[in-house]
Amino acid sequence: MKLWLTIGAILVAVTVGACGSTTGEGGHINSTPIKKNGERSYEFEPEDIERAEEAPQAVQDYCEGAVSEAQEIGCLSHVEESEVP
């Protein structure tokens, strides 16, 4: 868990300028969040977004406490169901 929080913190540091909704229409993760200046942000790899959207329910429940979009996507896209306690 600490490793994923550390990864999440790093992702947050990388995306400090990013702002926007975690979820888009239909509850899906917004793959093009908006920066503070109104421009679209492309900080996340499409493969990470796809894995995050397809995360099993156990992983979604595990990542529920994410405090940022970066941490949530990092968790959803990199935690395997077998790793969930």
Image (tube, grey):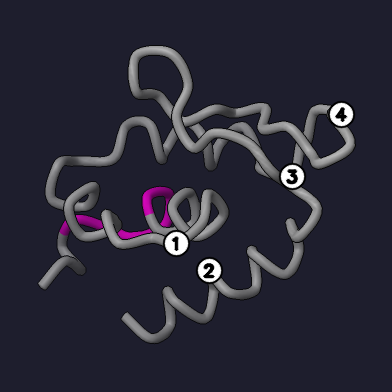
> Is 78 within the magenta?
yes
Q: Are marks 1 and 3 in contact (CB under 8 Å)?
A: no
Vertical side of 9 occupied by 54: above or below: above
Magenta span of residues: 76-81
The residue that label 3 is drawn on is 43
Measuring from the top left, give residue 61's x and y in whole percent: 17, 52
Circle 2: is it few (<14), some (14-19), or many (20+) Cα within 10 Å? many
Q: Which of marks 1 and 3 is in front?
A: 1
Amino acid found under the numbered disc labelled 3: Glu
Please identify the quadrant where the N terminus is shown: bottom left
Amino acid found under the numbered disc labelled 2: Gly
Q: Is mark 4 on a helix, strand or loop?
A: loop
Measuring from the top left, give residue 39's x and y in whole percent: 86, 28
Q: Are marks 2 and 4 in contact (CB under 8 Å)?
A: no
Q: Which residue lies furthest to the top in this view?
A: 25
Residue at the spot x=20%, y=68% of the render? 83
Between marks 3 and 2, how big is the CA–CA gap?
Answer: 13 Å
Q: Which of marks 1 and 4 is nearer the N terminus?
A: 4
Q: Do the residues labelled 4 and 3 touch (CB within 8 Å)?
A: no
Measuring from the top left, give residue 80's x and y in whole percent: 27, 58
Q: Is mark 2 on a helix, strand or loop?
A: helix
Q: What element carries label 1?
A: loop
Q: Which of marks 2 and 4 is nearer the N terminus?
A: 2
Q: Which of marks 2 and 4 is in front?
A: 4
Q: Nearer the viewer, mark 4 or mark 3?
A: 4
Q: How many marks?
A: 4
Q: Which of marks 1 and 2 is in front?
A: 1
The residue that label 2 is drawn on is 8
Q: Do the residues labelled 1 and 4 touch (CB within 8 Å)?
A: no
Q: Could you say which disc has been placed on residue 67 in the image?
A: 1
41 relative to 10 in the view: left or right: right
Between marks 4 and 3, how big is the CA–CA gap?
Answer: 12 Å
